[in-house]
């Protein structure tokens, strides 16, 4: 098909040209005397992105899922109780992994379209007088439903209950795009990946661990081998990795961290909010459709999940957008399959770029019988962006 493919799934995201170019490198010896400069640049850059002084970042050749496993297996033992809420496919999958690994998961099932129920978490933690719950799992941005949870409020609930559990945060689709404060919010393990806000291809699992979490590797009894943080810590301390690192991706990461520093993390977070608000204007005011996120407090600045009207299959809209207009939209996953489509608006993105997604989604919806007013999404987004000061 002529023209470029317009990629608007909520990860992998668009890789900026300069990051792509940075990855075109000859292979080199990962045990050379020069190699540690690469590792040190990455560690320093990731600390800025996680907003941490005291945390330790790790980079695995894996995806985010690998770091879910690393977070859990390096800190917990079989049968340990963990508290988690399920409100979308990704919060569900992390819970499922914990169960497979032999943990005792106290699951709070919430309506999809809502997020971490901090009041309920407080009640459960407060009632756990013997502190049998060892970790609290929170999905910062549920990519399947376009819901962002208030992690600071989770920390407040834990503190109010005087509970010493670890706080594990999935920030796969929020890191470097939605505000996340590792130190300030007392996060113990933050799990992410390369293919979203960091604007890289998939292939790196990114983790940040607190000193308290790292200490537990000496007593945690869950089985681990490849994801053993001890091996990583020992090698990283000298600037190396315990195995062959994904060199091209590491060069890409150095470049994307440079881009993040140049724009400034606060500006990036503001840009994501501004762009997301334009998309929401298109959906709600333009098309008159609803988001999966039930209330404004849950709205995600990295992905919008748009409910299609009764009688229309969201999968048809996505197929039509792809086959006719070369536009990739995100699918409805699991329980919401067919009920919605998603526009990812994270990473390397601006207004005009996003207009392609809005215009293309609108054409695909019209083709599939959704009675939206032609041009209404673009008009509403344009109205919002033109009248809003970004910085
Ligand atoms: N958590 C969230 C919120 C995600 O969006 C994803 C992937 O999209 C994952 C975890 C899994 O990450 P990965 O696909 O990198 O393994």
Image (tube, rainbow, N blue to C red):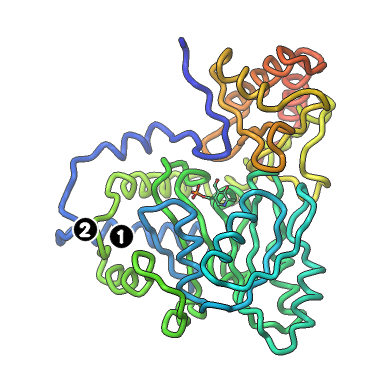
**Numbered mark located on residue 204 in the image:** none
Residue at which label 1 appears: 39
In the image, 130: left or right of 54?
A: right
**Residue closest to the far bottom:** 130
Q: Position of residue 124 (x, y in %)?
A: 77, 76
Residue in the picture at 31% in, 72% down: 231
Residue 346 visible here: yes
**Residue 35, labelled with which disc?**
2
351 lies above or below 99: above
Element under disc 1 = helix
Label 1 packing within 10 angstroms: few (<14), some (14-19), many (20+): many
Q: Residue 146 versus residue 181: which sits nearer the camera?
A: 146
Q: Position of residue 350 (x, y in %)?
A: 58, 31
Answer with left or right where residue 148 lies relative to residue 58: right
User: At 49% across and 76% down in the image, what residue appears?
Assistant: 75
Looking at this view, is 349 or 234 the one in front? 234
**In contact (CB < 8 Å): disc 1 and disc 2:** yes
């Amino acid at each position: 098909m002529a023209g470029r493919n317009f990629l608007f799934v909520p990860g992998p995201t668009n890789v900026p040209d300069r990051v792509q170019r940075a990855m075109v490198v000859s292979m080199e010896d990962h045990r050379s005397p020069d190699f540690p400069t690469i590792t040190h640049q990455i560690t320093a850059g990731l600390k800025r992105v996680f907003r941490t002084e005291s945390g330790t970042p790790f980079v695995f050749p894996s995806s985010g899922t690998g770091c879910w496993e690393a977070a859990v297996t390096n800190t917990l033992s079989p049968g340990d109780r963990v508290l988690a809420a399920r409100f979308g496919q990704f919060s569900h999958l992390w819970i499922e992994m914990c169960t497979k690994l032999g943990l005792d998961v106290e699951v709070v099932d919430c309506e999809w379209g809502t997020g971490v129920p901090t009041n309920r978490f407080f009640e459960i933690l407060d009632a756990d007088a013997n502190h049998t719950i060892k970790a609290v799992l929170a999905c910062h941005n549920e990519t399947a439903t376009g819901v962002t949870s208030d992690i600071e409020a989770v920390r407040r609930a834990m503190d109010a209950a005087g509970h010493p559990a670890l706080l594990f945060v999935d920030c796969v689709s929020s890191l470097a795009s939605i505000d996340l404060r590792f130190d300030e919010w007392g996060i113990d393990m933050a799990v992410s990946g390369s293919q979203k806000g960091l604007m890289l291809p998939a292939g790196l699992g990114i983790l940040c661990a607190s000193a308290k979490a790292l200490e537990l590797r000496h007593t945690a009894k869950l089985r681990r081998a490849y994801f053993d943080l001890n091996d990583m810590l020992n090698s990283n301390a000298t600037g190396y990795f315990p195995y062959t690192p994904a060199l091209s991706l590491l060069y890409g990461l150095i470049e994307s961290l440079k881009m993040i520093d140049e724009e400034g993390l606060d500006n990036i977070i503001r840009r994501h909010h501004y762009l997301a608000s334009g998309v929401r204007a298109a959906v709600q005011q333009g098309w008159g459709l609803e988001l999966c996120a039930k209330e404004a407090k849950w709205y995600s600045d990295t992905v919008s999940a748009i409910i299609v009207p009764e009688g229309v299959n969201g999968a048809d809209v996505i197929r039509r957008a792809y086959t006719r207009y070369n536009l990739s939209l995100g699918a409805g996953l699991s329980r919401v399959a067919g009920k919605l489509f998603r526009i990812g608006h994270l990473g390397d993105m601006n207004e005009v770029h996003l207009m392609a997604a809005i215009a293309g989604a609108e054409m695909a919806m019209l083709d599939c019988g959704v009675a939206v007013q032609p041009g209404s999404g673009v008009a509403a987004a344009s109205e919002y962006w033109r009248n809003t000061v970004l910085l």
